[in-house]
Amino acid sequence: MSNTVTRQSNLGSFHVVIKETYRNPEDYRIEGNHEAFNKELLRLMPQVQYYVAKRLKSAILAGKLNKGMFSPNDFTDQLFIEVYDNWEAIKDERDLRPFLFKKVDELLDDSLTEEEFDHVFFENIDSFSQPEWDAMEEDFSTDGDGDLVLLEELDDSSFQNENYTLNHVFITEEEKDLAEKLDKSLDKERVERHIHMVLGKMSVPMRSVYQLYTDLGFSTAEIASIREVTLDEVDDLLSRARKLLKESFVKRFLIDSN
C-alpha cells in the first residue's frame, strides 16, 4: 500500500510540473528561444531517463547490447530536438507526457535490436528445479555486466520507492492469499530480483507495456498511443505479463521443486 501511495503522490507532483512545463516551452518556441525551451523541458527528463535506463539495462542483460554503447543521455538529448520540431503535435498538457515517451520509445526501437520471447524459459517453467531457478537468477545478476549502474546513477528522489512488489503481480482479491504466503518467505530484495529476472525473459513489447503501466502510471489508453498498438493489444500484453510473473512465483516458491 505504501508504494502505491508514494507512486500516486509522485505522479501528482509530476502533473503539476507538466502543467507548468507545457505553458512555458510553448512561449519559448514562438520566441525561437531553444535554450530556454530545453531548460524547461529538462524538468521532465528524470522519468524519461529512468525508463530509458531500464530498457538499456534489459538489452545488456539479454546480450543484445554491449555496456557503454549507449547512455540514457544519448536518447534524451535527441528527444529535445524531436519535441521542439514536433511541438504542434502536442495539443494540450495531457498530451505532453505520453508524447515524450512515444518519441523516446521510437528512438530506442530504432537503435536496439528487438529481443524475442525466451520461449525455452516459459515452455519449461513447470519443470525447473530449485537449483535451476537459483542458477538463472545468478546468471541474470552477472551476465551482461549485471552490476550496471545506469539506474543507480539516476538519483532523482521520485524513484527511490519505485521498487517492484508482490502487489504489482497479485492484484485480485482471489490472489491475495498467494501474495500473503509469498510475503512470509520472501524479502523485498528477493521479490524484486525475481520480477526483474522474469521481465528480462519477456519480449520488448510485453516488458515495455508492463513497465509503462507499473513503473510510470500510464493508463492502458496512453500506452496504446505510446506503443502505437490497439487498446486490446495493450490489455493482452499486460495480462500476459502478469500471468507469467504470477506463474513464475507459484512454480518457484509455492510448489515443491523437483
Image (cartoon, helix red, strand yellow):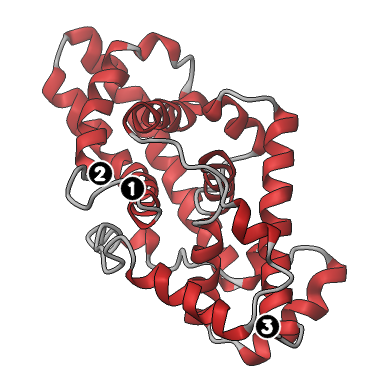
Seen from the viewer's position, the closer of residues 221 and 119 is: 119
Q: Secondary structure at mark 3?
A: helix
Residue of label 3: 253
Which residue is label 1 attached to?
Answer: 56
Q: Which mark is residue 72?
A: 2
Verify CB contact (< 8 Å) between mark 2 and mark 3: no
Residue name at image x 69 percent, y 25 percent: 230
Q: What percent of the width, then of the height, locates residue 140? A: 42, 68
Inter-mark Cα distance, 1 to 3: 29 Å
Give the crowd class for mark 3: few <14, some 14-19, many >=20 residues within 10 Å: some
Classify residue 102 by image quadrant.
top left
Q: Considering only vertical position in the picture, is 75 above or below 12?
A: above
- Horizontal placement of 177 versus 151: left or right? right
Residue visible at 69% across and 58% down in the picture: 123
Local secondary structure at mark 2: helix
Outermost residue toward the right in this view: 174
Q: Which residue does the image show at 40% across and 30% down from the upper left?
A: 109
Q: CA distance from mark 1 to mark 2?
A: 8 Å
Q: Residue 68 or 179: which is nearer the viewer? A: 68
Q: Relative to 147, is 134 above or below?
A: below
Between the C-alphas of marks 2 and 3, the distance is 35 Å
Which comes before the other along the chain, label 2 or label 3?
A: 2
Q: Position of residue 239 (x, y in %)?
A: 73, 49
